[in-house]
Structures are given as structure tokens and as C-alpha cells.
Image (tube, helix red, strand yellow):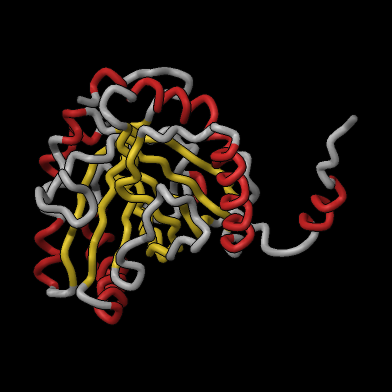
Amino acid sequence: MTEDTRPEAYAELASVGPYGVRPGHALITMVEPHPGHEYAYNRWYEDDHYYAGAMAMPWMYAGRRWVATRELQGLRYPEKSAVAQPVSAGCYLSTYWITQGRYDEHMKWTVGINRRLNRDGRVHQDRTHVFTAFQDHEVTVYRDGAAGPRDYHALDHPYAGLVLEVIDAEGPEQRAELLEWLGSRHLPRRIAGGPAAMVTVFRPTPLPGDRMTYVKQVEGVDTRLTLLWFLERDPREVWADHFTGLDAPVAETGLGRVELVAPFIPTVPGTDRYVDQLR
């Protein structure tokens, strides 16, 4: 007997609502596999969860996984971070784009599918969510103006590295001021002539009340900003000249504090490359 999957509903849903290509929203999730479970976690995520728990969902149209080896973990700062305790926690980062205007529809699906995956024993429990949040896109700053890939290409373009930067503003009003300063003044200057082709800026949104219990509620919904710097070179090659000291200019504004600056390189799908370099 053929299972009823209600195919007629797909045609109906496809005919309504936004369907542009802009990344209006993102899922940014930094996870730490428990010691001794690194290989099992990587295989579960690569072989199953990246697809069944992410890319197969409606309106999540691009994704990429990143990894921080122990060498890359050692570059992180500040040592006392409100995001990661210790600051080295969270050696895998996954980033996904969601179509602008489709956040609510995607959230309905993701809650439902993750309940089903959990019920069917397809969720790897030996891991800790260090920093997991759905986010709304605020601004993208490009190094080369209209030339080069756009933000909607960012997770498909073969960038050599990524830097995750998390900033906590002093309050909601200060976050608005900080966002204006970042987008119009600081980031255009900082990115000019450097190894980052673009930097995207997001603000977190609260997770639904019926989320899975192993994912904690998002902190700093009214005060936090999340930046993703997309690099054309390995972050280890450019760290000293371009990514140390990102915290100082923010502190000088008096509007907030950098809580994490963390470099990553892309994983190689279908392999266990770098797993033996995590600890």
C-alpha cells in the first residue's frame, strides 16, 4: 500500500507566498561532540542529519558545515566568553540560509521533523549545543562592491574559511546604534583590501516553545548580533594581520562587547577529515 503523503498540498503551497533567493534568515549552530564520540557525531551529521534535519526542509536552500581544529580553537578570544565556556567549546559550526519571509513556515516544519527524527532514534544525543540560534538578516557588507558572489551564494561558493563573531550590545537601543556603526562605518573599513569577501550580520530570534529540549532557549534576543566573515584564505594565514583585536573598536564605542571571535575552515563532505585534529 502506498503511503499517503498528501502530494496535492505541495502544489497549493508552492503557489503562494515569498519565493525569492535572499537569505532573510539563517540557522547558525555551533556544537561540541562529547569526548570519544567525535567520529560517530561527524558521520551522523554528514550522512543523515545535514540532509534529513536541514537541507530537505522547505525554504532552507543553502548550507555548509565548518570545523575548528585544536589549532583554530587556540586562536579564539576573548578567553572569558558569554557564548562558549570554555572558549574552545564548539568545534563544529553549521550555517544555513532560509528564504526571506519564510521563517514561520520553516519553523513549523523543523519542529515537526525533529520530533519525528527524535522519536525514530535518528538524533545523536552525545553532543552539546554551545550556540544555536535562528537569526534574521540585517545587513551584508561586501569588500568588492557589486563584483563577486552575493550573500545568497556564500554557502555554495568555495570559501577557504569563516570567522564567527558574536557581539552583545548594552541594550536594545545600543544594538540599533551598534548595527548602524557596523554597517556604515566599521565593517566597510575593516573589510577593505582584506581576505574577507563579505561579512553578513544577523540578529537572533527566540526559538519556539515546542523546540527540542536539548536545545536551550536563545540568549540576547534583544541585544546580540552575529557576524559571519567569509574568507578567501585559510584563517590561520591571515589571523594576526586581520582578525586579532576585533574587540577593541567595539569596546571603544561604549555600545557593547565582543563575546566571541572564532575561526573555522570548511569540512569535506563525506569524509572524516579533521576529526583527529579536534582535541
Horizontally, is 220 left or right of 158 in the view?
Answer: left
Residue drawn at x 45%, y 57% is 134
In which image quadrant can residue 106 be found?
bottom right
Foreground of the two, 117 or 12: 117
Q: Is there any visible trace of residue 143 in the rendered image?
A: no
Task: Give above or below for 252 relative to 123.
Answer: below
As drawn, the residue found furthest toward the right would be: 1
Q: Residue at x 22, y 44 (%)?
A: 262
- Residue in view at x 12 percent, y 47 percent: 244
Q: In the rendered view, tell whether residue 38 sits above or below residue 256.
A: above
Q: Is residue 85 left or right of residue 20?
A: left
Q: Nearer the viewer, residue 170 or 153?
A: 170
26 vs 45, nearest the viewer: 45
- Quadrant containing the N terminus is top right
Q: Residue at x 18, y 29 (%)?
A: 70
How far from the left and from the top, in percent, is residue 214?
A: 41, 47
Can you give x and y, in whole percent of width and height, for residue 209 in the image?
49, 63
Residue 107 in picture, x, y percent from top left: 57, 57
Q: Measuring from the top left, give residue 166's x and y in whole percent.
A: 26, 56
Residue 62 vs 44, above or below: the answer is below
Q: Give left or right: position of 174 versus 129.
A: left
Q: Above or below — where is 252 with respect to 155?
A: below
Q: Quadrant of the C terminus?
A: top left
